[in-house]
Every structure is written in C-alpha cells, then in structure tokens.
Image (cartoon, grey):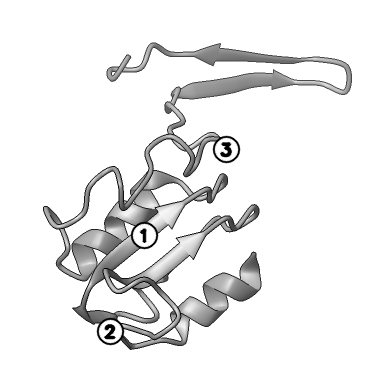
Amino acid sequence: MRDAAHTYNSMNVTNHPCYTPSRYALFVLDNQNLQDIWDFKTHPNLTILRGTVFFHQNHKLCLHKINELVRHVGLEGKVDDVDISKLNNGDQVACKLPHFPSHFYMVLSHHTSCTIYKSEHL
C-alpha cells in the first residue's frame, strides 16, 4: 500500500492516539500489500512519546523494516512477540535473499551462459 507508507511518512510524532489500545502508539494490522513503513532518509524525525508499536498480519512487510523502525524510535527491548508477530509479518514475500556473485559471459538471443560463484555467507 503505497498510500499507507506515504501517510506514515507524513507523521513526525505519535503520542498515543485515541483509536488504539492504550498500550500502543502505532497499531499496524492486516495491511495485505504494505511493503514499507518509513523512509528514514527523507523523513528522519519520528518520535513515539508514549506507548509502543503493534504489527500483525502485514504479510508483505518484512521484519527487518519493522525492526529498523523500532530501533530508530528507541523501543528496542520494549517490544516482544505479542507486539510484533514473527509469524505473520513478511510471511508472503522473500525478505532474506542471498547474494550470489555471478558473471554473464555469453548472451545470445537463444541462450545465456554464466558462472555463479560460491557465496562466502552460505
């Protein structure tokens, strides 16, 4: 949902909105196509004054994006699996793709030849 990510990027401070349960300042639930939540390069100022965050059933939103937001607003150690589901956030998208160094040395109209080198991380 590009519009949802754009909406989040227009915020600077969230201070316990009235429509979320009392524990949560940011409640993100069941956004089937949400893939990004915040662009810290263009919008570096995000502050959560009170409360924590809730992320569940955002199937295309990778955990590393949620964890980046948690780190940025200083909530590390203040959220757990009840607040942020490891099971149903990012479960319908490839979030961790290994890098395989490769070299394409013959590209023709009907075939391509390449060498894929062993990755140091595998």
Q: Nearer the N terminus, badge 2 or badge 3?
A: 2
In the picture provided, is 122 more to the left or to the right than 60?
left
> Pointer 3: what residue?
93
Which amino acid does the dot numbered 2 rest on? Asn
Q: Secondary structure at mark 1?
A: strand
Disc 2 to disc 3, C-alpha distance: 28 Å
Residue picked out by circle 1:
54
Q: Secondary structure at mark 3?
A: loop
| 64 relative position to 112: left or right | left
For residue 106, side relative to residue 67 (left or right): right
Q: Residue furthest left?
A: 77
User: Where residue 88 appears, x then y in whole percent?
Assistant: 49, 39
- Which amino acid lies under the numbered mark 3 shown in the image of this protein? Val
Q: Residue at x 45, y 80 (%)?
A: 19
Dot 2 corresponds to which residue? 45
Q: CA distance from mark 1 to mark 3?
A: 20 Å
Return the x and y of residue 113 as percentages of the image width and height: 68, 13
What type is the residue that disc 1 sits on?
Phe
Q: Residues within 10 Å of mark 3 (few under 14, many from 20)?
A: few
Residue 37 appears in the rendering: no
Name the residue at 58% across, 72% down: 4
Front tag of 1 and 2? 1
